[in-house]
Image: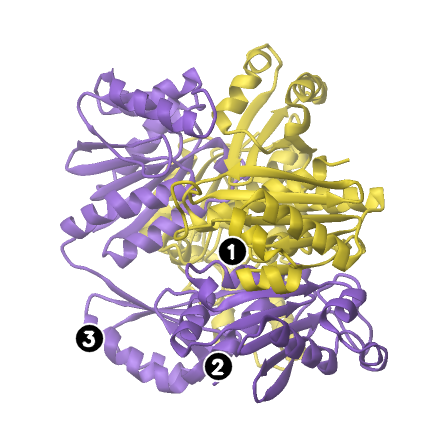
Chain colours: A yellow, B purple
Amino acid sequence: MKAALLTIGNEILSGDTINTNSSWISKTLKGAGCQVVCQLTIPDSKQQITKGLDQLFSQSPDLIISTGGLGPTTDDVTRESLFDYFNTKSKFDDDYWNELKIRFSRFGHDIPESNRSQALVPKAGKVFSNPIGSARGLRFEKDQVTFMALPGVPIEMKAMIKATVLPWVKEHAPVATYVQTLRTTGLPESVLIEKIDSVAKTDHGCEMGYYPSVYGVDIVLSSTHKESIYHLKNELLPILGTLVYTVGEETMEEIVVHSLIRKKQTIASAESCTGGLVGHRLTQVPGSSKVYLGGVIVYSNMAKIDLLKVKKSTLTRFGSVSEETAEEMSQEVMKQFKTSLGISVTGIAGPGGGTDNKPIGLVYAGLANANGVKTREFQFGDERKTNKLRTSQAVLNWIRLQN
Amino acid sequence: MKAALLTIGNEILSGDTINTNSSWISKTLKGAGCQVVCQLTIPDSKQQITKGLDQLFSQSPDLIISTGGLGPTTDDVTRESLFDYFNTKSKFDDDYWNELKIRFSRFGHDIPESNRSQALVPKAGKVFSNPIGSARGLRFEKDQVTFMALPGVPIEMKAMIKATVLPWVKEHAPVATYVQTLRTTGLPESVLIEKIDSVAKTDHGCEMGYYPSVYGVDIVLSSTHKESIYHLKNELLPILGTLVYTVGEETMEEIVVHSLIRKKQTIASAESCTGGLVGHRLTQVPGSSKVYLGGVIVYSNMAKIDLLKVKKSTLTRFGSVSEETAEEMSQEVMKQFKTSLGISVTGIAGPGGGTDNKPIGLVYAGLANANGVKTREFQFGDERKTNKLRTSQAVLNWIRLQN
């Protein structure tokens, strides 16, 4: 089953609001066996709504979903345009208007007159309920395409997709699509793809998608046959080995925290160039307080000496961005927090601070446990924020891989 | 000047990746006097790329920008489709291929053959440079429309918009649109709007947009008349007072770091519920090492006692989430780092840990300086990640407002 999405709204088009609705709808529909094949964003304008609908109908999807433009304040452009497009008159729904009045009074407000438009229903066409807000959905049929209009407020849109759209899709979709994600980190996209090229080129019956981000590359397998995904996954996993940090949707920090909980380990962080990001990511995970006891951010040399007892001679001889400093930082933070592990990072995030010997993006990390300490060197790029993110991902990944 | 955006990518259409590129481009172009009138997302398919280009060309914008599909792994659908659509043959750019080889070897990889496609250039059409990645941009002219293709990786796309697209827009836009943003924090959108309602309803000749986020509400004024913006801004600022943390695009952390640099102050952080986020945000700003010396993340009671010398009696009597604990944390961290300011946060981020007396979202912050210490209480919501972000924003804002 194929769907097309029409996003109506000046705020989306101007970039002031990020269109998270479309991705949520696409993902949700895909799980139910409905593939979004096209998404169009247009302004709140009758002419553009008409043109947009023409474009989407010309693709002959099974379903078109629009979001936006049904609130009380949007001068009713969308509702009016839709009634005209689907060639129907409207009538006023007194029952719904009374219901709205009661809802508003319950929250201590008089209902504004601007809400009246929300009680307008099409003579040829249907309304469906909004469990959360006052703007109901509209549904029309034309040229064997089902059209559903939803409000753009995410929480209302999502409730209506779940209550009305999904049941419709499940009833009408001939086959469901199954999806599985292998999340990898550590190799650039093209190198990763070369690695699995021989398997990717076999007749595995799945679609494969590669989605790079600053954290790594997600490999998404999808198919209408659950078994095809199962087989392809089992071909890929031995080749990819530890590059895959999860099969599923979990984040790296979730993987790390859950694995530390299972292993009954605790950890503390000593951060220089990441400035607290490692701690921040670990504490994004509910329950992280079981394993993450805290850390020290030593953004100055003085702090490295005073708070983490890094030897002055180490700093003088090897510099603050060095294996030796990373070693001392991780061991000391482990000791201070009495944890089973200590992780440290020290590096040059940029844009300043690089030299010929130690360029921007150079990072040393240390990982200490009761048996001693290991260090690693990383070379990232030129951009400060990216360097911080990549560093945090690399050290979290290292924690995941330690035994 | 009008622009249309073509987003090419299965990962966007499937919802696996949120289309943040489009909103960024729209905002950025708007500031330069170019309005995005339509945005279309289509799959990596030659047929759909052709159809999509036809649709966008039929709107006769001045500029069409595509993003996505120029990576090494996308089977070259986009590049090939574009060369065909604009009716040009390709040639192989040996110089660029050699440059790519060197770049890969610097990061310790052999260049995969799949990257060869990135050295293909059109015979009729231009390439423009990518300061960050290997996929260069493509530019074609047709029917008095300029078309530019960019890669979809946000950091590369942004660098190329700044280096190539924006200068082109500025050169060709007939009337510039002036935009000014008043960034506020501390009041919900509806209350903020009510506050400035009387001014907003005057005949000020500007468009006003309200853009709420977890950090606050941005009020965006735009007009083709610079003076209208100037006057409206000067009407609004006295009403809004300290709610406005910047007129411009700076982030809260930039404002804070730059103001501390000006005041020659230094700061250290003691974080519990935010887990390092305050330090992370401060260290996002280049030059922050001048003022931010570091911090301690005390995610456990033991760490509060051992590392920040919070009195056991304080924890027993008032609890770890209390004014008293926040006070001691901020004073001690200031002492340890020898800074002029110490900021502390302790709270219940959720989802666990709430009680009747101390619900989820309750946060205490402390701000110490040589003259003593002040505390503040905040009550945020139920969601862990949002609570962390709102807490960080509230304390950064407090640092901004201190004298």
- Amino acid type shown at disc 2: Leu
Q: Where residue A152 is drawn, which disc sits there?
A: 1
* CB-based contact (under 8 Å), mark 3 and mark 2: no
Cα distance in 3D space between marks 3 and 1: 34 Å
Chain under numbered label 3: B
Circle 2 residue? B401
Cα distance in 3D space between marks 2 and 1: 36 Å
The mark closer to the camera, 2 or 1, is 2
Assess disc 2: are there few (<14), some (14-19) or many (≥20) residues with their C-alpha within 10 Å of its C-alpha.
few
Cα distance in 3D space between marks 3 and 2: 29 Å
Q: Is residue A327 left or right of residue A192?
A: right
Helix, strand, or loop for circle 3?
A: helix
* CB-based contact (under 8 Å), mark 3 and mark 1: no
Residue drawn 59% across the image and 59% down it = A304
- Amino acid type shown at disc 1: Gly
Q: Where residue A186 is drawn, which disc sits there?
A: none
Helix, strand, or loop for circle 1?
A: loop
Assess disc 3: are there few (<14), some (14-19) or many (≥20) residues with their C-alpha within 10 Å of its C-alpha.
some
